[in-house]
Image: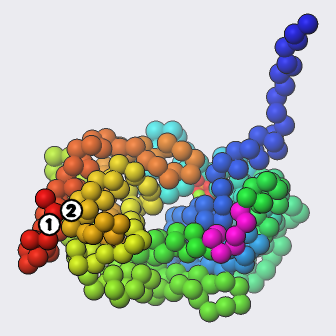
């Protein structure tokens, strides 16, 4: 006889662990969430220390607002946030966070410790978490205003995930990549990334310029070939801020830093259009460096497509991409005036 399965409600810890595995896929995802929290907290200085590519240790220290002592008991529960109240607020959201899931997720897949101090409090507090819950009472401690989040043994609760992430070096490169992109986009903030016990692998001063940070991080070869332009489109209501290499520069590695309303995102559609524009000028297999920051009216942007927020949907996507293509083409044509005979028609 064929018997139906018995349906049961999953245990809360199981539910949360499954969800956490989707949000925190590797150290670089965890770092992105933490960086966004530090930026949301108005930090001007953010320092990251890693061990084994972030798998053994991922620590981020900021000088932001800190977290109120009375919130420490719920901060790592799922869906607790200081940023969103009503669903409708999502249409105007000005913070990176709104789901209240990052710290909760991390506490389900790693050992998590939060040390924090607000301006109002006399001393700081240190608290540890597991599976969304505070372990013991927060302990008073000395410290400057801001927050230190310490994550150890990432994915110790998920041995398969841990095993799949074999190479600490690969993970470190991905961590470096995320930090580099945020550092370029946020030149007003000073960033430091180091492997524990080593000299910084990346360091940008607070209140530098975007061009400075591109040079510091991506090197002089790229910096000296950069063209900068801005563009405002009244028809489709967007603004574009761009730094891209002229056609004299080409590299095997394609670098695209894409921010939409300050969020680091990916867009396969935009990337392929940009590749196609450059392909007319660059030798086969060679690529540009492109930094692009697109600003749209918040109500035209859906940021809630995926928990990692890697992807966004926006109104007039095809039209906007077409306009961006025209702008980039015009820039390249200008920069290429002296060598336009190279253009392969
Ligand atoms: P979300 O960012 O979506 O609100 P998180 O789980 O990332 O959710 O963070 C939960 C809350 O913890 C935030 O709303 C914020 O109030 C607080 N928080 C997290 N990180 C920091 C930080 N570095 N500085 C100040 N507050 C923070
Ligand atoms: Mg967050």
Reply yes or no: does residue 28 show up in magenta: no
Q: Is residue 273 visible?
A: yes
Judged left or right of residue 184, residue 229 is: left
Numbered label attached to residue 280 = 2
Residue range (magenta): 165-171
Q: Are marks 2 and 1 in contact (CB under 8 Å)?
A: yes
For the residue pair 23 and 325, the one nearer the viewer reads as 325
Whole-percent x, y for residue 76 in the image: 73, 56
Q: Residue at x 38, y 62 (%)?
A: 258
Q: Quadrant of the N terminus?
A: top right
Q: For mark 1, give the secondary structure.
A: loop
**Label 2 Cα neighbours within 10 Å, binned few <14 / some 14-19 / many ≥20:** some
Numbered label attached to residue 343 = 1
**Label 1 Cα neighbours within 10 Å, binned few <14 / some 14-19 / many ≥20:** few
Judged left or right of residue 301, residue 71 is: right
Whole-percent x, y for residue 136 in the image: 89, 63
């Amino acid at each position: 006889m064929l018997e139906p399965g018995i349906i049961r409600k999953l245990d809360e810890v199981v539910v949360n662990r499954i969800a956490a595995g989707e949000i925190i896929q590797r150290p670089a995802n965890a770092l992105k969430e933490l960086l966004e929290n530090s930026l949301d907290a108005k930090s001007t200085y953010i320092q990251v220390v890693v061990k084994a590519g972030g798998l053994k240790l991922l620590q981020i220290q900021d000088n932001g607002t800190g977290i109120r002592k009375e919130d420490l008991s719920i901060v790592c529960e799922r869906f607790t946030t200081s940023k969103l109240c009503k669903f409708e607020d999502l249409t105007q959201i000005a913070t990176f966070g709104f789901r209240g899931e990052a710290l909760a997720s991390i506490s389900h897949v790693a050992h998590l410790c939060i040390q924090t101090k607000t301006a109002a409090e006399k001393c700081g507090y240190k608290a540890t978490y597991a599976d969304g819950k505070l372990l013991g009472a927060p302990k008073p401690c000395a410290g400057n205003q801001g927050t230190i989040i310490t994550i150890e043994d990432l994915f110790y609760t998920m041995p398969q995930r841990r095993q799949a992430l074999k190479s600490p070096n690969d993970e470190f490169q991905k961590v470096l990549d995320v930090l580099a992109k945020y550092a370029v986009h946020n030149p007003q903030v000073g960033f430091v990334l180091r492997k524990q016990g080593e000299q910084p692998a990346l360091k940008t001063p607070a209140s530098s310029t975007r061009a400075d940070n591109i040079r510091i991080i991506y090197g002089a070869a790229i910096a000296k070939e950069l063209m900068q332009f801005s563009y405002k489109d009244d028809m489709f209501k967007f603004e574009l801020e761009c730094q891209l290499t002229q056609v004299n520069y080409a590299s095997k590695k394609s670098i695209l830093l894409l921010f939409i309303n300050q969020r680091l995102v990916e867009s396969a559609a935009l990337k392929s259009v940009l590749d196609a524009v450059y392909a007319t000028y660059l030798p086969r297999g060679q690529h540009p460096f492109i930094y692009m920051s697109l600003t749209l009216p918040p109500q035209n942007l859906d940021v809630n497509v995926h928990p990692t927020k890697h992807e966004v949907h926006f109104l007039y996507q095809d039209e906007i991409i077409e306009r961006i293509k025209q702008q980039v083409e015009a820039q390249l044509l200008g920069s290429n005036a002296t060598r336009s005979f190279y253009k392969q028609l």
